[in-house]
Each structure stands twice: as C-alpha cells, then as structure tokens.
C-alpha cells in the first residue's frame, strides 16, 4: 500500500537557510523548496557534509523530502511501516493536502503518533470531500469485523469531532454495551452529540465511578458569578502538573507563573475574567466535585475531568486527547460569558486537544512557541539507530512533539515567544513559517515576570524556625548539622526529573570534593504518591551518597514546598543578618526561562544557571550571577569550583545585582500588561467557526 502526497506550491515562502543542524536544514528545505510537478524525492541539503546517519537521517528524509512523493510503507528505507506512514501523513498535513476519507481511515490502525496526525487531518478531509463520503467511510469501517477496541473508539471520536452520524444512536449504544471502557466512553460522547442520543445514554446509576457519573449525567454547573465589568474573558491552560503543587510530579515553574499571572491579569481593567484550565483525575474529582472554582476575584479554575486516578503524565496525554477536546468544548461553551482567547504553552497532545476545542467554539488562539525539543534533537540522536533501544523511542517522541508544535503554530491566531538573548530569532531558525509570518526577527516576546512575595504574619519568626529546622541534625536526610551553618550553602529547587539533573549536580559536588567545604540542599519531589521519575531520581541520589556518610551529612533532601515557603527559605538564606553564604544553583540541561532562578535572584541570592536556553538574556556571567556548562558532569564541576572560589565581597555584589535585575525588569504586572495587549489585539473572531 502507498500513501501518495501531492505537494501544492509552497504557502510559506520562508527564506532559504543553510544550516549544519540536520533538523534545521531539513525543515528549511521543506518549507522553501519549490513544489515541482514531477515526482521525485531529493536528498536533504547538508552543506557538503554527510547527511545525518542512523534513524534521525532516515526519519528526516522520510518526513521532509521536497516535492511530490509517494512513500511506500515497506521496510526498504530501514524504517518501520508506521515510521514511513506517519512521515507521509505529517507531510500531507503540513502541506494542507486533504486525503480522501478512505485513505485517512485506512491508516487508522497505527499507534498514537499516527492517530494524532489522522485526527488533525480529518476535519479538512470532511470539509474537502463532504459529509456523505466521510459518513459512508466511517460507517463501513465501524461495521468491519476487524475493528479493534482502540480503532472503534478513534472512529467514533472522529465522527463526534466533525458532527457526523455514521451509525444510529441504537448502534452506538450497542457498541457501548459490548465494548471496553475506551469504546464505552467514546460511544457516550458520540451519543451526547447525536440528535437522538440522549434516549440511549444509560442512567447515571450505571456509572462505575465519579468520571462516568460526570460523563453520563447532565452538564455539571460551571457557571460562575457574572463578571462585574466588561472586558476580555481569557483562558490559559495548565495541563501538565498541578497548579498549586510546584515541585511535585510535573509541576514546576509554569504552575507558579500561571497562578500569579492569572491573578494579575484578572485585575487588569480590560479583562473581565481569567480561567485557568487544569485536568482533574478521579481523586481530585472525589475530593472536590466542583468543576469551576474561584481562586482569586476574577480568576477562576476550570477542571477538565480525566479518566485516570490523577492528572496524566505528559507522555501519556495522547490517551486522553479526544476526551480532553470533548470536555473542553462542552465546558467552555457552557460558561456564561464566551471565552475570547485561549492561551496554550506546551507542545503536546493535550494542547492540541484544546486547540481543537477552541476551533469548535470559535475562540481565538494564542500559542507560546519554544525551540524545545528542536534544539537538542540533532545532538542527542545524530547516530542513534533502531538497535539503540534507549534512543529510538525518545527520538520518535521528540519528532512527534515537533509536529505538534507545527500544528499549534498553524492553528494559532497569534504566536508569541519566550524572551531570549536574540529575541525570538532562534524561533525562526526552528520554525521557518514564523519568518514569513512575523519577519526575520520573529514574533513578539512579551516580558516574563514573577509575582511579588507577600510576607506572612510573623515573617521573621517563621524564617528563623525554617533555618533552625534546616540546621537541626546532620544525621537526618532532610537536615544539616548545626555546626555546618558557617559553610557555603548551595540551594537547588525544582521538580525531580532527569531534565533538571539533580543527580548530575550531586555527582559533581561529590567528585570535586566540595562536600568537604560546602553544604547542598535539594528541594523538590512529592512524598505522597511520587511519580516514577521522582522515585528513580530519589533512588539515584540515595545510591550516590551511600558510600559517602560524611558527605551525606552535608546533603539535605527536602520534599517540594508551596511557593511561599520556598521563597521564605530563600529570603532566610539571603538575609545578611543570618551570616549564611548561600548560592542558588540550577543544574538543568537547559531552561527556556527559569522562574525559580528569577525568584531566587529576587530574594537576594546570587544564582548559577545553565548557559543553554533563555537564562542568559537576564543573567550575565560575572555581572549578576554565573552561567555554567551543564551538559556534562565535568562542565558542571568546573562551574561549581568557579562559584565556590568567589570571594564573599563579590558574592554579595552579585546578589545585589541579581535582586536589582529581578525586581526592576521582571515584575509580573509588566508581563500581565503585555499579554493583555496581545490578547486584545488577537481579539475574538467575528464569525464563529464552531461546529
């Protein structure tokens, strides 16, 4: 079987780019190449060098080859059938080439990466070829005896997403009664939209759990008090991690940012309300059945039910894509005031689901794009092959995220970037379409910011108690010896995850012998129901110090704390009256922005942070902090040696400069004002495209 892709003339017209990075070269060649009329499959440009070896080169060749092409779904290329089919479908999707309904549905047996592309292509296919053809194709596939449970659920969701009725309500109810949980839920979603479906939905008493009760029952109340003033209604998504649990699981700086940012945007004179959209698993729904609650005046939190015990990990978001799109469409449409703008930030399946919901209800879309994982792909996978089991799947996952980011950029009415040393020019390098859309300098990059710290009642007492607890007992794993209070202290705060590299920091601290003359405090990770990544990181950290009991006494591993407690600890450590020579150390492989770094700087701690990423646009090496090579243990060790060699007088100067940078340049009010300007400019579409 062959998937044919006929390429129309390029609609992007971005400037041609010669680049040594194979991914960049492939993408620029694809978006700038003239679309010839004769089939060919040219090689990718590689500046006189050999094309990327291994799977990376083959996958790029399959996905980004220029011109019209037919991709055979055999193994001649050394790739799997799913690899080449997915590559061909992505190319067709990027070129806006609508495949026929039959051609799309023939491929509806692939894995999650393939079905993500099919779900993206299906609305355009229906629009191009008409509902009659699409319904007939879906009907035929649903009747086929070879349809498995996952495929049946996908077909029902494709029908629901485009308002098609390939089977009767009675037939959908029969599928629900005979199918597994996934099919049952897809059939119920289909019945909710079918004109005759309500009569075939089971009674709520048939629900097996809280999620099914919500799915079967009438629309839960999500109306809130009517906003007191006119203005924009803004929604922002926080699908990864918990809004109120930074440092646990997947919750990091973004949860802190969106919480404070939403509060401040809600107070803006041109904004009527802010709605932060978060997922809620079974446990959260049982603990608080409200789907809409008020966090602060004008700032609401909307929970999207998720069929899992807790909110899904990012790498499993694809399992909930169709359901998230359905819930978001249903709940956002039920609000008393329509949402004018939805702001998405992550390039994942959950964001794409919300983008689909925005299209259905006529809400304008803003997307914050970042060159992640783009900038690391070539370096990480240049020589990986299928025999490299540790790299094969991550490579395909990262290329999937690149595709998702492209779709979000394509759907967005406004794309913005994260501030960096070169503005957003780096985005144009990785997203050639942005060069045409916004010029060579790229899209706007509104300033980021941090919320002001609000001292608690008896703040001084609370700080003293925190320090007393921290320096209470060196034999405890979460404390240090009282006598070590005079040593320089290195503080690291963040979720426990491989990308944050707490293990690399600990290795470097041990290898350099710095444990003999400094202490190390790591804050992060849940203690109640930790994620696999958290469990693995804790295991590695524990194993690293098992044979170093003296070093272990100078290491404190603290669980994640609420943001106000973290910032209180940082202020306590930075207080000159306490006499503690503390540094904030971020060992991450890269940080796109680094909210935690800025918060530490604002508290008065000098910070050492990664060279890679966006930190360098506000942290100048040797001026208001230090930049380190965090790509290896050796580079990090060199950075730690340099840091600990800084005289105390200079450390204090760096701390003062750091605080000045954070307080003057990065107020959350400035960020809120800039974003409201972007939201107002994006506005609400005059004619809804809702289905």
Image (cartoon, rainbow, N blue to C red):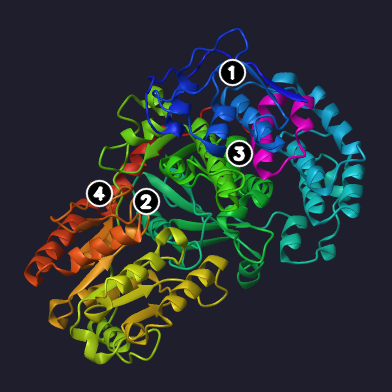
Q: Is residue 16 left or right of residue 357?
A: left
Image coordinates of residue 369 in percent, x first then y, are 42, 40
Q: Nearer the viewer, mark 2 or mark 3?
A: 3
**Residue for badge 3:** 356
User: Residue at 75% across / 34% down in the picture?
Assistant: 163
Q: Main secondary structure of the magenta part?
A: helix
Q: Is residue 477 left or right of residue 358?
A: left
Measured in 3D between alpha carbons, the distance from the residue under mark 4 to the one under mark 2, in whole angstroms, is: 27 Å
Is there CB contact under 8 Å for labels 4 and 1? Answer: no
Point out which mark residue 616 bears: 4
Point out which mark residue 41 bears: 1
| Residue 31 colored in magenta in the image | no
Measured in 3D between alpha carbons, the distance from the residue under mark 3 to the one under mark 1, in whole angstroms, is: 32 Å
**Residue for badge 2:** 265
Q: Nearer the viewer, mark 1 or mark 2?
A: 1
Measured in 3D between alpha carbons, the distance from the residue under mark 1 to the one under mark 2, in whole angstroms, is: 50 Å
Is there CB contact under 8 Å for labels 4 and 2? Answer: no
Looking at marks 3 and 1 on the same chain, the residue that comes earlier in the sequence is marked by 1
Measured in 3D between alpha carbons, the distance from the residue under mark 4 to the one under mark 3, in whole angstroms, is: 35 Å
Secondary structure under tag 1 reads: loop
């Amino acid at each position: 079987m062959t998937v044919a892709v006929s390429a129309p003339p390029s609609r992007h017209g971005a400037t041609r780019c010669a680049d040594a990075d194979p991914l960049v070269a492939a993408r620029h060649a694809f978006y700038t190449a003239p679309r010839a009329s004769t089939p060919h499959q040219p090689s990718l440009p590689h500046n006189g060098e050999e094309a990327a070896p291994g799977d990376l080169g083959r996958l790029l060749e399959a996905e980004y080859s220029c011109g019209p092409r037919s991709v055979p779904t055999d193994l001649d290329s050394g790739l799997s059938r799913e690899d080449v089919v997915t590559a061909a479908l992505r190319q067709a999707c990027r070129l806006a080439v609508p495949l026929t309904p039959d051609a799309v549905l023939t491929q509806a047996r692939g894995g999650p990466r393939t079905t993500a592309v099919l779900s993206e292509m299906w609305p355009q296919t229906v629009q191009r070829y008409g509902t009659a053809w699409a319904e007939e194709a879906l009907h035929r596939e649903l009747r086929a005896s070879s349809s498995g449970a996952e495929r049946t659920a996908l077909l029902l969701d494709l029908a629901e997403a485009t308002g098609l009725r390939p089977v009767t309500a009675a037939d959908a109810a029969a599928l629900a009664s005979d199918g597994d949980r996934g099919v049952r839920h897809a059939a119920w979603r289909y019945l909710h939209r079918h004109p005759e479906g309500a009569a075939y939905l089971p009674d709520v008493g048939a629900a097996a759990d809280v999620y099914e009760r919500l799915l079967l029952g009438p629309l839960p109340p999500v109306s809130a008090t009517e906003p007191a003033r006119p203005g924009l209604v803004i929604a922002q998504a926080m699908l990864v991690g918990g809004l109120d649990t930074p440092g646990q699981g997947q919750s990091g700086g973004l949860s802190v940012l969106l919480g404070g940012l939403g509060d401040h945007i809600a107070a803006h004179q041109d904004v009527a309300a802010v709605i932060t959209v978060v997922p809620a698993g079974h446990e959260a729904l049982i603990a608080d059945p409200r789907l809409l609650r008020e966090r602060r005046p004008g700032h609401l939190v909307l929970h999207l039910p998720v069929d899992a015990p807790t909110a899904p990990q990012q790498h499993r978001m694809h399992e909930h894509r169709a359901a998230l799109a359905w819930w978001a469409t249903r709940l956002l449409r039920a609000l008393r005031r329509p949402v004018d703008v939805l702001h998405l930030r992550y390039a994942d399946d959950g964001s794409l689901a919300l983008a689909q919901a925005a299209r259905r209800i006529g809400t304008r879309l803003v997307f914050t794009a970042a060159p992640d994982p783009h900038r690391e792909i070539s370096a990480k996978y240049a020589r990986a092959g299928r025999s490299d089991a540790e790299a094969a799947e991550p490579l395909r996952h990262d290329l999937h995220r690149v595709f998702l980011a492209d779709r979000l950029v394509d759907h967005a009415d406004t794309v913005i970037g994260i501030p960096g040393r070169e503005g957003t020019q780096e985005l144009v390098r990785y997203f050639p379409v942005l060069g045409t859309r916004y010029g060579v300098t790229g899209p706007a990059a509104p300033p980021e910011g941090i919320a002001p710290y609000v001292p608690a009642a008896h703040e001084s007492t609370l700080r003293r108690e925190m320090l007393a607890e921290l320096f209470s007992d060196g034999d405890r794993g979460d404390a240090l010896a009282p006598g070590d209070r005079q040593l320089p202290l290195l503080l690291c705060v963040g979720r426990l995850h491989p990308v944050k590299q707490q293990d690399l920091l600990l290795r470097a601290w041990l290898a350099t012998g710095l444990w003999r003359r400094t202490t190390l405090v790591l804050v992060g990770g849940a203690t109640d129901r930790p994620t696999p990544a958290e469990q693995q990181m804790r295991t590695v950290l524990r194993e690293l110090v098992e044979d170093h009991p003296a070093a272990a006494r100078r290491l404190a591993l603290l669980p994640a704390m609420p943001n106000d407690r973290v910032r209180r600890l940082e202020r306590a450590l930075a207080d000159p009256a306490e006499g503690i020579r503390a540094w904030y150390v971020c060992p991450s492989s890269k940080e796109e922005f680094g909210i935690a770094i800025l918060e530490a700087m604002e508290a008065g701690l000098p910070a050492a942070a990664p060279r890679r990423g966006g930190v360098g646009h506000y942290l100048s090496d040797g001026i208001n902090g230090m930049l380190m090579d965090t790509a290896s243990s050796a580079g990090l060790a060199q950075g730690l040696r340099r840091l600990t060699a800084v005289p105390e007088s200079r450390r204090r100067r760096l701390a003062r400069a750091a605080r000045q940078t954070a307080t003057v340049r990065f107020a959350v009010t400035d960020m809120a004002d800039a974003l409201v300007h972007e939201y107002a400019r994006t506005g609400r579409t005059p004619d809804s495209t809702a289905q």
